[in-house]
Amino acid sequence: MGRRIWRRSANANFTDKMFLVLFSVATVAVLASPGRVKLPWLIVAVNTICCLLVAGLAQAARQSRLWRFLHDWYPLGIFIVCFEEASRLSFVVRDAWQDHYLLALESRLFAVPPTVWLGRHGSPLLTEILEIGYFSYFVLLMIVGGALYPWADKRPFRQLMDATVLSYSLCYLVFALFPTEGPAHTLAAQHNFAIPGGGPFHWIVGLIQENAGVHGNAFPSAHVAGAVVALFYAWRYTPRLGSGLTPLVALLGVGAVYDRYHYASDVVAGIFFGLIPAWLVLRGWVGPPGSGGAILARP
């Protein structure tokens, strides 16, 4: 099976290769310690299917525009699979949550945990405004990628995708080495009040979290990291779009704490886990050679 996937991935780009490495490493980790993971063989099966899909799309991309389009955009679906799987691998390396380190750090910096403080000053209007920012995460990559994709030179789009998969991969690595469950669980006793209800954005974010949210994956915030990567390339190549998206990313960071998904330290770490990969890919230090950092003209 491994040789078959390798042959099919001969035309793989950096994003493809990162996914193949991710799923291969995760599979090895599951097989090495199946007792630490629920339904280990299901995870192995899903990883194998994903590897075949990635390799197959890399091979088919040269056959037609449709296959090339699917190959360029398939990461949007694979990211969801990886994020969900990362939560299932929380204890593949460690035996317990590590939140106490973050709680100790923030107790030295803040008299009241930021997520608790924000909740005490919440209101329906504030909830809805912050949820607009939080919801923007789910469309930011599509917005920035969609703005860059029509360009004749595909390097900006490829840089965006490569930096995003690198950023998420680093987050997944930390999730396994330093698993944290977040303030909704560790500070539940201090959250003795409900988040004030908002409007439609509050409802839709709650619906997404209820059906697709995970227990774990708190530090660093992968949502913030991914949003920062998208914003970085928006500013780099389409500054007007970058200026319009900046307030949404700022609201996303605050909303992640307000909604009790993340500690403030998760958000700060997420910013760095977005900026560093974005910069490395832009400079050509990671990813395909010759990607460079020059500003490219639109067609």
Image: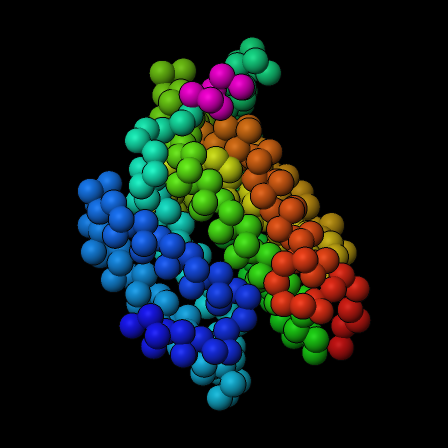
Residue sitting at the far bottom = 63
Name the residue at 42% across, 25% down: 99
Q: Nearer the viewer, residue 92 or 99?
A: 92
- Expressed as whole percent of the image width and height from the top left, the position of residue 185 reads 36, 26
Residue 123 can be seen in this image: no
Side (left or right) of 163 relative to 60? right
Question: Is residue 156 rendered magenta in the image?
Answer: no
Q: Main secondary structure of the magenta part?
A: helix
Tell me if residue 31 comes above or below residue 158 in the rendering.
above
Q: Position of residue 250 (x, y in %)?
A: 63, 39
Q: Position of residue 273 (x, y in %)?
A: 58, 43
Q: Residue at x 30, y 44 (%)?
A: 88
**Which residue is drawn at the image coordinates 65% and 46% (left, top)?**
275
Looking at the figure, which quarter contains the C terminus?
bottom right
- 55 to 128, vertically: above or below: below
Taking the magenta stretch, the answer to whether it contains residue 101 is yes
What colouring does the structure picture have?
Answer: rainbow
Q: How many marks?
A: 0
| Residue 268 point in image, percent of width and height | 60, 33
Return the residue nearer the eye: 127 or 117: 117
Can you say which quadrant of the picture contains the N terminus? bottom left
Q: Is residue 270 left or right of residue 57?
A: right
Q: Nearer the viewer, residue 251 or 2?
A: 2
Query: What is the span of residues highlighted in magenta in the rendered image?
Result: 100-105
Q: Residue at x 22, y 57 (%)?
A: 42
| Viewer can see residue 283 | yes
Is 180 placed above or below 145 here?
above
Q: Residue furthest top?
A: 111
Classify residue 224 by image quadrant. Answer: top right
